[in-house]
Amino acid sequence: MARPNIFRAALGAAILFAVAGWAVVKPRPLPEDAFDGITGDAASGEQVFWAGGCASCHAALQAEGDAKLTLAGGQAFPSPFGTFYAPNISNDPARGIGQWTAHDLGNAMLRGVSPAGQHYYPVFPYVSYSKAERQDIADLRAYLATLPADPTPSKPHDVPFPFDIRLAMGGWKFLFFNSDWVLMGDLSPEE
């Protein structure tokens, strides 16, 4: 008679652990109405684009003398966890982010969550963008829409098991995603 009670207790504990684990690692997108009433301005978005350093990772290598900015991605970022590749963020509707809304871009940049609801790896510096204003995100989306589309597919990350489990990024976010300001050193009140 004691064995069924032990089994029930173990099963109950396992279920409780799984529910608590899901609460920690689940993606947390922005509310659906986060961008209601916000209209993007492409001219302001261009400033956000250059200030955010988007081209440093996503600009495709161009032939010499080609002044056209193409955001087809492809730059490799080797790490101890595998090699990550910058994705295509051009305006291509199938291979880039041409179908994305300001809300989709906001989820990516402010929460590290894809339109499909998956966690992004922190090689994409969404933690650095977490203080961005929603207007800035809408402006950036408006600017990105003015750039040329490129049908180059994004290269998949070369990340071995267990680092390829995106749900684990929820645990990383729980431990390390802190959007508080970080100030170091002996600062005066004016600083």
Image: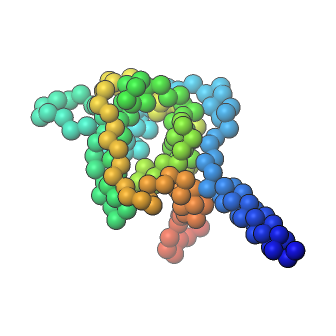
Q: Measuring 62% from the left and 31% from the top, which residue is drawn there?
A: 35
Q: Where is residue 29 in the image (x, y as percent from the top left)?
A: 62, 42
* In the depicted structure, whether residue 9 falls above or below residue 127: below
**Residue 116 position in % (x across, y down):** 54, 37
Can you see residue 187?
yes
**Residue at 52% over, 40% down:** 114
In the image: residue 64, left or right of residue 43: left
Which quarter of the figure has residue 30?
Answer: top right
Tell whether 57 sits left or right of 183: left
Residue 80 at x, y percent in the picture: 34, 65
Residue at image coords 32%, 55%: 83
Instruction: Identify whether 155 is placed above or below 94.
Output: below
**Foreground of the two, 22 or 140:** 22
Residue 168 is situated, as x and y percent measured from the top left of the image, at: 53, 58
**Which corner quadrant of the image does residue 190 belong to?**
bottom right
Residue found at the very far left of the displayed protein: 64
Q: How many marks?
A: 0
* Quadrant in which the N terminus appears: bottom right
Residue 84 against residue 73 in the figure, above or below: below
| Residue nearer the viewer, 103 or 4 | 4
Q: Is residue 59 left or right of residue 116?
A: left
Residue 91 appears anywhere in the view: no
Q: Which residue is drawn at 69% across and 55% down?
A: 23
